Amino acid sequence: MLTRNQIRALVNEHGHDIIEHEHMHIERGCYQHGCVTTFAHSLRVACLAVWFADRLRLWDRVDLRSLVRAALLHDYFLYDWHEWDNGDHRMHGFTHGRTALRNALRDFELNAIERDSIAHHMFPLTPTPPGYVEGYLVTMADKVSATRETFSLQRFNRPRLPHAGAVRRAATTKDKD
Ligand SMILES: [Fe+2]
Ligand SMILES: [Fe+2]
């Protein structure tokens, strides 16, 4: 059985280019649930998805690399969904899987498992279920992590982050350079 450190090493091994991508600055600057940023949430989901695959003994049916990459990118929507933003984020729960996929396709090469798992990770809130075991593991890890993060007592003293809009503008300006 994999230890916590071994799982973290596997996530780094298969996802280092995603973790180090410059657009991850946006995820680092936005809270997702409670006091956990979208970046930290995505890392947690990746580690937990690998833990589930390991404890459920699914390694003959799961592609580890696709699982890690889909989990790291499942919330790659790159905005702060708590901001009102003229109502643009009102349907966030229903639309952000597709937005994450669109952004991820722009920045990375993705296989069919990764694409499907990112797009459908909000099932059953969105109607189409994942088409691969990896997608179910991401969905399951996401629900467990989100619930833990939302109800953690630490949420009451979260530090101030650089404003997401400023982070996003900085990233966009850099893109144009
Ligand atoms: Fe999500
Ligand atoms: Fe998530």
Image (cartoon, helix red, strand yellow):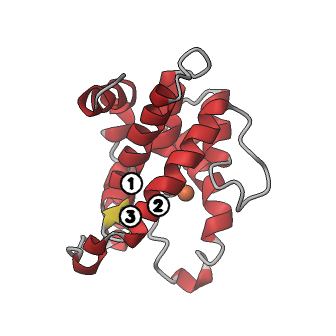
The quarter in which the N terminus is drawn is top left
The answer to whether mark 3 and mark 2 are in CB contact below 8 A is yes
Query: Which mark's residue is nearer the viewer, 2 or 1?
Result: 2
At x 61%, y 77%, the residue is 88
Question: Residue 16: x and y, percent?
Answer: 33, 31
Looking at numbered disc 2 in the image, what kind of residue is underneath it?
A: Ala
The foreground one among 58 and 135 is 58
Q: Are marks 1 and 3 in contact (CB under 8 Å)?
A: yes
Marks 3/2: CA distance? 5 Å
Q: Which of 176 and 138 lies nearest the eye of the viewer?
A: 138
Q: Residues within 10 Å of mark 2 (few under 14, many from 20)?
A: some
- Is 132 on the left-hand or right-hand side of 77? right
Mark 2 C-beta closer than 8 Å to ligand 2: yes
Asked if residue 139 can be seen in this view, the reply is: yes
Give the image quadrant in which the ligand numbered 1 is located: bottom right
Of residues 69 and 46, the one nearer the viewer is: 46
The residue type indicated by label 1 comes to His
* Cα–Cα gap, marks 1 and 3: 8 Å
Secondary structure beneath disc 2?
helix
Q: Is mark 1 within 8 Å of ligand 2?
A: yes
Q: Which residue is mark 2?
A: 146
- Residue annotated with mark 1: 41
Q: Residue at x 49, y 41 (%)?
A: 71
Contact between labelled residues 1 and 2, with CB atoms less than 8 Å apart: yes
